[in-house]
Image: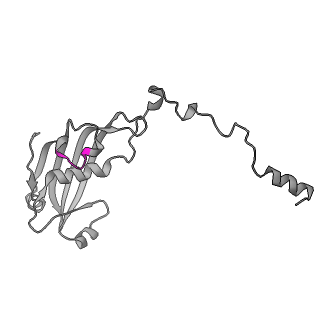
Amino acid sequence: MLDRLPEYIDPLHLAEKRGALEGRIPLSKFQRLADSLCNNEGYVEVSLFFGREGKLAKIDGHIKSIIELQCQNCLNAVEWVVDNRVKLGIVTSIDGANRLPEDYDPLLVEADGKVLLKDIIEDELILILPTFPKHQHDCLAEIGIPGKTDLPSDSHSERENPFAILAKLKNTGDL
């Protein structure tokens, strides 16, 4: 596996030649993803295979990584394992994107055909990130903050009904 992949690729040309790209991209290269990460150390392993299925130019592949996100409960780092399949249909227009089979996501390329490889991978990573990353265990209890199980339950405490006085008036007929 290569540590260095090409910066720009021509997906349509690679699909015609049935090309393949395998290598690593450092997490530090992804500017849009940086805000979601606790640190940008590490890399993303990329395996992409280009080809055609009838008239459809496509990219099939896999991306793998372990990234650190910020837990939305305790605000500490949580490791998130990325092991995602990439399945893209290469299109040159919105109309072409609308005609793609259901299991393909569109990759819109311009007339010159060149795209940044890191942008394709970064888009895939952003799409699979959880909205609210959290530890699998009760991380709040570990740092001394009571969890949901430690808080008093409202169902056990007796609360005065604010409309109880109206019920009494209705029963006595003074209303």
Picture coordinates of residue 69 (x, y %)? 32, 39
> Residue at the location (18% across, 41% down)?
28
Residue 54 covered by magenta stretch: no
Residue 34 in the image: above or below residue 105: above
- Residue sitting farthest toward the bottom: 95
- Left or right: residue 170 versus residue 68 is right
Magenta stretch: dominant secondary structure: loop
Picture coordinates of residue 51 (x, y %)? 15, 58
- Residue sitting farthest toward the front: 174
Residue 138 in the image: above or below residue 48: above
> Residue at the location (20% across, 36% down)?
42
> Residue at the location (24% across, 44% down)?
34
- Depth check: 109 or 143 in front? 143
Number of marks in the image?
0
Picture coordinates of residue 112 (x, y %)? 8, 66
Residue 31 covered by magenta stretch: yes
Quarter location, residue 65: top left
Residue 90 in the image: above or below residue 119: below
Quadrant in the picture for the C terminus: bottom right
Picture coordinates of residue 54 (x, y %)? 18, 66
Look at the image and give the residue range highlighted in magenta: 29-34
Residue 108 in the image: above or below residue 22: below
- Left or right: residue 150 versus residue 112 is right
Quadrant in the picture for the N terminus: top left
What coloring was used for the rendering? one colour
- Left or right: residue 115 versus residue 84 is left
> Residue at the location (82% across, 51% down)?
165
Quarter location, residue 27: top left
